[in-house]
Image: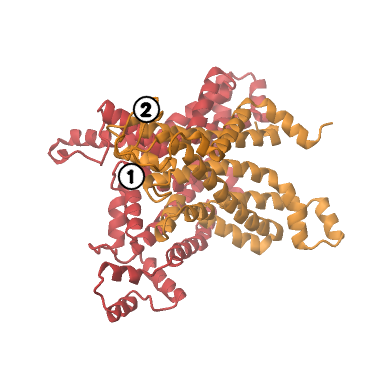
Chain colours: A red, B orange
Amino acid sequence: MTRYLLKRLAAMIPMLIGITVISFLVIHIAPGSPADLLVQMNPKASPEAKARLRAYYGLDKPLYIQYLFWLKQIAVLDFGYSFTPDGRRVTDKIRERLPVTISINVLSLLLILVIALPVGVLSSVYQRSLFDKFSTVFVFLGFAWPSFWLALLLMMLFGVTLGWLPISGLKSYNHDNLSAMAQIIDYGRHLILPILVSAFGGMAGMSRYVRSSMLEVIRQDYIRTARAKGLSELRVMYRHALRNALLPVITLLGLSVPGLIGGSVIFETIFAIPGMGQLFWQSAMSRDYPVIMGMLVIGAILTLIGNILADISYAIADPRIRVA
Amino acid sequence: MLTPYAEFWYRFKKDRLAVAGSIIVISLFMVSFLAPFIAPYDPVAIDARHVLMPPSLTHWFGTDDLGRDVFSRIVFGARISLKVGFFSVGISVLIGILIGALAGYYGSLIDSIIMRFVDTMLCFPTFFLIIALIALFEPSIWIIMIVIGATNWMGVARLVRAEFLSLKQREFVLAARTAGAGDLRIIFSHILPNALAPVLVYATLGIAAAILIESSLSFLGIGVQPPTPSWGNILTVGKDNIEIAWWLSLFPGLAILITVLGYNLLGEGIRDALDPRLR
């Protein structure tokens, strides 16, 4: 197990370097240099001041020197300072946004599992039943439904027409005066719609995946053996088939991380939630290069961590992986 | 004995969902080409006297905040989605085929370097990459199509590589090489045609994904810019008037839903008809 773990971690290193190279290039292939932008914000800046700025940010050096300089910085988790007037550290800005986005994503992953596992399993066990057909329709709609449109419709229904749920922000104006219990409920009410929106597409994908994975397993010889032994159908399905069918789901969970982080841009912008997605959107709109680069790197590293966690859980659940 | 082509048709025609998908896609093509004849109004004509009118017999889907006819805007919006879908998928399929073929055909070191690069690209939240790239350039429909294409080729590359890895071992490749065919000839005229079927399925599903991305970007305001109508930017107006004009939020979303559904059904239908075992 330790060997497997070390091997996986070693394989991460070239990918980490690749992540930094791509994040750096994305910013630097764009027309216009960051110094021009700083000058734009202060039109009175003289050419000398501009040259000073370029030197200050190291922009007068060749590209690969700039990259190495940046890499040296981020190796100690220093992503520099934001270009926005507050001029705060990029790491601070990202750190205060991470918990919101990660909690929403974890909760929506849980929601995906809670809904998709039973749906997928039942529609495979009762293949071609009415329930299976019904859930297939749900899956097709789920794949095709634009998440931002779902957000809009839910806002219209629950926020405007029924007035049951708030449609913007993370807490109410009077949040600080509420009791601890009421504060939690307040957060909950604000989070219901965003979590629903971010989980919706994943539910469809996951239940489809569980269904086909189950159907695959049900055809295997050991299921026929289990039935031939005279085990009850319930025991065959849940003890022999389900356990094996669920293994690949672990990998799928790991693979869904980048989609969830990217998707956070959409629901955080729509519901005005102060998370990573909103910060990324704001930084991109104001061309805040250090924050954009920092978030590209951190977003990709989160994915990498998700994949590694999935691999490790898979190896724990399935000994065949460790040996091979 | 049926030819593979006839066999494909036979299975495809029996699949009701696939037929429904084809009908949707064909209708979309017709709407796009015949847009000026279908739309009752000029999609960009402002009419200050009929602002935010609810659906009626004169304006089937109502009007927007500038008095433009929503039905006409949706009809013309079909052109944008068609264009974005096909061009961006064209770009991603091209990149994916080149990179996948290179990795799969040459194998060894080239393969491992390329596949590491693909894995690294897959680590990035695609939407982050897309927004960063579009924000750095000026948003225009060409930039959008190029950026969507340039960030969504990894699936095609993996698919093509896997096909090449198995196909290059086959006898017909050996036969071609014995006959003196060069690498380029073997890659493009011997192996590639045999690897295209799964790419076709992937591309059809990719069109649906590209349309979803474009409408999200237009909704957020960095996609297709008004006054050019796109389903996404009509929905932006819907969000701004969410409390008074439900029709602005309903109809464009339905158009996206039906379109994406159509391409998805078609793609899955093609896949099932190509390989019925996957069902």
In the rendered image of this protein, does residue A302 appear above or below residue B16? below
Seen in the image, is B261 located left or right of residue B237? Answer: right
Residue B43 in picture, x, y percent from top left: 42, 40
Q: Chain of mark 1?
A: A
Seen in the image, is B34 located left or right of residue A296? Answer: right
Depth check: give the residue in front, A177 or B265: B265
Residue A20 in picture, x, y percent from top left: 45, 63
Q: Chain of mark 2?
A: B
Residue corresponding to mark 2: B55
Seen in the image, is A129 located left or right of residue A154? Answer: right
Residue A187 visible, this orientation: yes
Residue corresponding to mark 1: A268
Residue A202 visible, this orientation: no
Q: Are marks 2 and 1 on the same chain?
A: no
Depth check: give the residue in front, B175 or A167: A167
| Residue at 27% across, 25% down | A162
Tell me the element at label 2: loop
* Badge 2 vs badge 1, beta-carbon distance below 8 Å: no
> Residue A283's image quarter?
bottom left
Q: Amino acid at mark 1?
A: Glu
Q: Residues within 10 Å of mark 2 (few under 14, many from 20)?
A: some
